[in-house]
Image: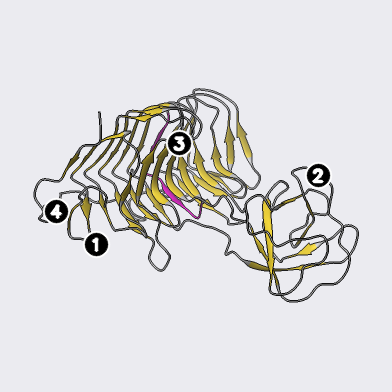
């Protein structure tokens, strides 16, 4: 079935008797009964955990785990890391990134997961949908974070070379690239293409300094010669930002009633990067440009990628501002099969094809 667009009347919809999620009606409330300063592991299955504060994130490997009314500060790659599990429920939790990773993810769900009534902020990806039947409903997603690239960096001349950047936030394996207003020390090159980049290594890594290799896991680079000008480091080659990221394996996912402030890429992203996707319903979400920040290219993106299989995706009854390029992107594909009653605050009317 090809793309179907229905827009009906071109007048403003009646204001529904509905309160969008925000900071006042989502996230954890009250006082935690326990607080953990270091990253915790939950290995048991069929457990419910309530009113706990995790100040360095939590990794879940058990199935059918429920986190309810918990506070999670993400000091690493994941806030809630549960991407290998089944039956995760995250309800009324506050998940905040601490901004010390070049790439981070708020809630990584596994299969058949439910994420509801959460306040998720300061992450590159807020919620990543797992496989199977899942629900992402009534969440407030805002203030996405990327390192402010480019950032000034200095290099030593020596064996090995040491780069200095206060509070860089890198971990071993992070890809980086360089530019300069003058000349970089030999053999460093300006990296203006994705193939010309370097990798942070574990040796010599501190909060304010790092060493790097020319290949992932390779030896530290030695520098020689002279240098001039102001040097810069970039750390966001793969900086796609998504409020709700759907990237493969979903067979019946409902994304509904969420309020998402978007930046850079999109508020809701549906693509088959890792596996085919089918029966995704993106219904009645509010997708807006983050105040004071550059908005996303599109508020909602749906399209076939490496697997060329995104089928029966429905985008209905959403409210949104126009992104940098448009509202809903499904250009060049026929895998979005139903789009209806999506309202543009920017145009003050229902959306037409290609908008």
Tell me, yes or no, if residue 23 can be seen here. Answer: yes
Across and down, in percent, residue 146 comes to 54, 58
Res 282 → quadrant: top left
Q: Which residue lies under the disc numbered 1? A: 346
Is 273 situated above or below 173? above
Proximity of marks 1 and 4: CB atoms separated by less than 8 Å: no
Q: Which residue lies under the disc numbered 3? A: 305
Helix, strand or loop at disc 1? loop
Q: Which residue lies under the disc numbered 2? A: 218
Proximity of marks 4 and 2: CB atoms separated by less than 8 Å: no
Is 154 situated above or below 239? below
Question: Any mark on residue 15, and which?
Answer: 4
Asked if the magenta segment contains residue 189, the reply would be no
Question: If you read the primary sequence from the N terminus, does the residue marked by circle 4 or circle 3 appear first?
Answer: 4
Across and down, in percent, residue 108 comes to 51, 38
User: Residue at the location (45% across, 58% down)?
Assistant: 143
Mark 4 vs mark 2, foreground winner is 2
Asked if the magenta segment contains residue 115, the reply would be yes
Tell me, yes or no, if residue 116 can be seen here. Answer: no
Question: If you read the primary sequence from the N terminus, does the residue marked by circle 2 or circle 3 appear first?
Answer: 2
Helix, strand or loop at disc 4? loop
Kindly give the residue lying farthest to the right in the view shown.
Answer: 159
User: Residue at the location (25% across, 36% down)?
Assistant: 3
Mark 2 vs mark 3, foreground winner is 3
The span shown in magenta is 113-123
Question: Any mark on residue 16, and which?
Answer: none
Distance from disc 2 to disc 3, alpha carbons, whole Å, reads 31 Å
Distance from disc 2 to disc 1, alpha carbons, whole Å, reads 49 Å
User: Residue at the location (51% across, 57% down)?
Assistant: 145
Distance from disc 1 to disc 3, alpha carbons, whole Å, reads 29 Å
Helix, strand or loop at disc 3? loop
């Amino acid at each position: 079935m090809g793309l179907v667009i229905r827009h009906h009347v071109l007048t403003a919809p009646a204001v529904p008797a509905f309160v969008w999620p925000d900071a006042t009606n989502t996230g954890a409330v009250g006082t935690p009964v326990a607080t953990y300063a270091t990253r915790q592991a939950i290995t048991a299955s069929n457990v419910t955990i309530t009113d706990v504060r995790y100040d360095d994130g939590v990794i879940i490997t058990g199935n059918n785990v429920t986190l309810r009314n918990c506070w999670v500060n993400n000091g690493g790659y994941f806030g809630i890391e549960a991407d290998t599990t089944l039956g995760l429920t995250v309800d009324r939790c506050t998940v905040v990134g601490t901004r010390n990773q070049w790439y981070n993810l708020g809630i990584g769900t596994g299969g058949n997961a439910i994420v509801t009534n959460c306040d998720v902020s300061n992450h590159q990806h807020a919620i990543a949908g797992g496989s199977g039947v899942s629900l992402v409903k009534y969440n407030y997603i805002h203030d996405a974070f990327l390192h402010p690239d480019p950032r000034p960096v200095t290099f030593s001349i020596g064996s090995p070379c040491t780069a200095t950047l206060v509070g860089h936030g890198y971990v071993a394996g992070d890809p980086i690239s360089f530019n300069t207003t003058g000349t970089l020390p030999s053999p460093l090159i300006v990296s203006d293409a994705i193939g010309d980049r370097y990798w942070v290594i574990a040796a010599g890594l501190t909060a304010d300094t790092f060493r790097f290799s020319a290949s992932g896991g390779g030896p530290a680079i030695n520098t020689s010669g002279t240098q001039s000008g102001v040097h810069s480091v970039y750390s966001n080659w793969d900086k796609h930002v998504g409020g709700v990221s759907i990237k493969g394996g979903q067979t019946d996912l409902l994304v509904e009633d969420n309020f998402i402030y978007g930046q850079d890429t999109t508020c809701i992203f549906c693509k088959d990067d890792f596996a085919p996707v089918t029966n995704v319903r993106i219904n009645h979400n509010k997708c807006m440009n983050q105040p004071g920040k550059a908005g996303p290219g599109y508020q909602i993106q749906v399209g076939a990628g490496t697997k060329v299989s995104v089928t029966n995706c429905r985008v209905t009854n959403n409210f949104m501002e126009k992104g940098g390029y448009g509202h809903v992107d499904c250009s060049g594909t026929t895998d979005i099969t139903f789009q209806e009653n999506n309202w543009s605050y920017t145009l003050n009317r229902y959306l037409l094809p290609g908008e």
